[in-house]
Image (cartoon, rainbow, N blue to C red):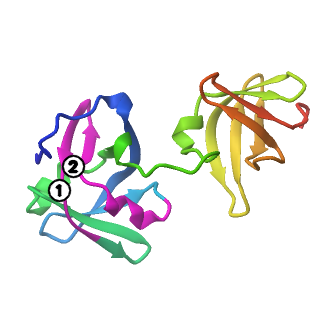
Amino acid sequence: MNDDGDSPAAAGDRLNVGRINGLYGVAGWMRVYSHTEPRAGILEYSPWYLERAGTCRPYRVAEGRVHGKGIVVRLDGVADREQARALLGSDISVERRQLPPLPEGEFYWVDLLGLEVVTVTGVVLGAVADFIETGANDVLVVRGDREHLVPYLPDRVVTAVDRAAGRITVDWDPDF
């Protein structure tokens, strides 16, 4: 474990950014699945908080790079394959304060999860349960009485996001 000197943030102040999903070589390197965009963006954060089986420990990123279509990384204090194996399956999170601020009107997906989605006519569609990246635009997966796939198109479909009220207003046909 390599603490950065600060006390770890509470779990609610951390955001999942990836997962340790494989081993790479014999010197403690690991394969990482990154949720960041671009994928290599995960390497810009340190420390990482590795969460597995109810425990959470901070680790500093010693080295990392893009390798093929993935990311490989070596963490301080992880010097061999067996130490790396012990971390397989760990979720990687970072403190919210490590994320760059966003321009007005932009949001991290995690900030929209769970928000109620209501049409401009007041029909409650449900809550944001997930997202789909389509390439053209992102799509909100809204679950309520049934599932709705609502394109995340600000000013066209998504007319307002009010995080304080816990609501997203959409111009969307509830029967679609």
**Residue 151, x across and y down, in percent:** 77, 48
Start-end of magenta stretch: 37-64
Residue 45's place in the image compared with 73, above or below, is above
Q: 5 or 115: which is nearer to us?
A: 5
* Amino acid type, callout 1: Ala
**Drawn side of residue 57 relative to residue 163, left or right:** left
Mark 2 and mark 1 in contact? Answer it, CB < 8 Å.
yes
Q: Which residue is mark 2?
A: 87
Check the picture and name the quadrant holding the C terminus.
top right
* Amino acid type, callout 2: Leu
Q: 50 or 106: which is nearer to us?
A: 106
Task: Decide: few, some or many residues near mark 2? Use Cα within 10 Å; few <14, some 14-19, many ≥20.
Answer: some
**Drawn side of residue 118 relative to residue 30, left or right:** right
Mark 2 residue element: loop
The image quadrant of residue 167 is top right
Q: 109 or 70: which is nearer to us?
A: 109
Q: What residue lies at 86% left-to-right and 21% top-to-bottom?
A: 122
Give the number of the disc on residue 150: none
Q: What residue lies at 9% left-to-right and 62% top-to-bottom?
A: 80
The image quadrant of residue 94 is top left
Mark 1 residue element: helix
Work out how far the residue at label 2 is from the one at label 1, CA to CA, in angstroms. Answer: 5 Å
**Drawn side of residue 140 relative to residue 76, left or right:** right
Give the number of the disc on residue 84: 1
Residue farthest to the front? 104
Task: Decide: few, some or many residues near mark 1? Use Cα within 10 Å; few <14, some 14-19, many ≥20.
Answer: many
Q: What residue lies at 73% left-to-right and 47% top-to-bottom?
A: 152
**Residue 38, x across and y down, in percent:** 48, 65
